[in-house]
């Protein structure tokens, strides 16, 4: 985004420290690690729970989040540890909403994926600083609305996920 943004991008409220650009804000920011494990077991031996949104459509806080796609992991019969002799299965439950308001199921591959999604911080700290009426408005970033719809599965399975959310520094101020 370079010259499209004013500098400094942020500072401490007292002005004692400035964060010149996105690189400095990210380097000095909070990095929140997330590890989630979700389960949605069968209702009973005969039926399954209806597939409903496990996590409704939302955008994350912060500048962005990086994550590995969810995997379905089986546990040993005692349910105390994952059974790594069983293959890890890509979870097929992640949806995003595009800029036209249409939802799409995201198909991740079995390759080594690392996903980056913009968070609402781009609206709070970046987009509002772009000069209106010029080419920099074409560089406007968009937070990614997303949802998870976990299908019911055997109670020995869980959907696991790891991500890292990047927030601005605690003492940063955006005038």
Image (cartoon, rainbow, N blue to C red):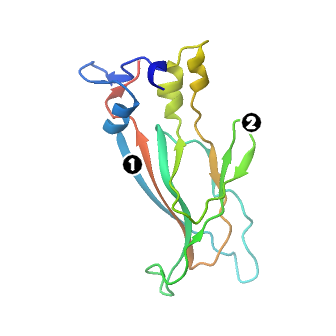
For residue 162, above or below residue 124: below
For residue 124, above or below residue 158: above
Q: What element carries label 2?
A: loop
Which residue is depicted at the point 55% across and 78% down? 87
Q: Residue 41: x and y, percent?
A: 63, 73
User: Left or right of 58: which side holds 6?
Assistant: left
Q: Residue 58: x and y, percent?
A: 61, 44
The furthest residue to the top: 133
Q: Is mark 1 on a helix, strand or loop?
A: strand
Marks 1 and 2, how far apart at CA: 30 Å
Q: Residue 103: x and y, percent?
A: 73, 47
For residue 116, above or below residue 141: below
Q: Can residue 56 be seen in this view?
A: no
Quarter of the image where one finds residue 131: top right
Q: Residues within 10 Å of mark 1 (few under 14, many from 20)?
A: few
Which residue is depicted at the point 34% across and 28% down? 172
The furthest residue to the left: 16
Quarter of the image where one finds residue 98: top right
According to the picture, the residue beneath numbered tag 2 turns out to be: 100
According to the picture, the residue beneath numbered tag 1 turns out to be: 32
The furthest residue to the bottom: 77
Q: Nearer the viewer, residue 87 or 83?
A: 87
Q: Which mark is residue 23?
A: none
Q: How crowded is mark 2: few (under 14 residues within 10 Å), some or many (20 or more)?
A: few
Quarter of the image where one finds residue 38: bottom right
């Amino acid at each position: 985004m370079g010259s499209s943004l004013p500098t400094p991008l942020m500072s401490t409220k007292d002005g004692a420290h400035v964060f010149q650009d996105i690189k400095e804000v990210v380097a000095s920011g909070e990095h929140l690690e997330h590890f989630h494990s979700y389960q949605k077991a069968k209702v009973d031996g005969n039926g399954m729970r209806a597939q409903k949104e496990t996590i409704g459509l939302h955008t994350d806080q912060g500048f962005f989040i990086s994550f590995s796609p969810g995997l379905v992991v089986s546990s040993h019969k005692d349910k105390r540890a994952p059974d790594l002799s069983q293959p890890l299965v890509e979870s097929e439950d992640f949806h995003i909403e595009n800029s036209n308001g249409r939802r799409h199921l995201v198909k991740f591959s079995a390759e080594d994926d690392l996903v980056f999604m913009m968070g609402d911080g781009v609206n709070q700290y970046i987009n509002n600083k772009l000069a209106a009426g010029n080419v920099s408005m074409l560089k406007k970033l968009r937070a990614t609305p997303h949802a998870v719809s976990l299908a019911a599965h055997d109670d020995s399975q869980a959907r696991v996920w790891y991500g890292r959310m990047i927030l601005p520094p605690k003492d940063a101020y955006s005038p």
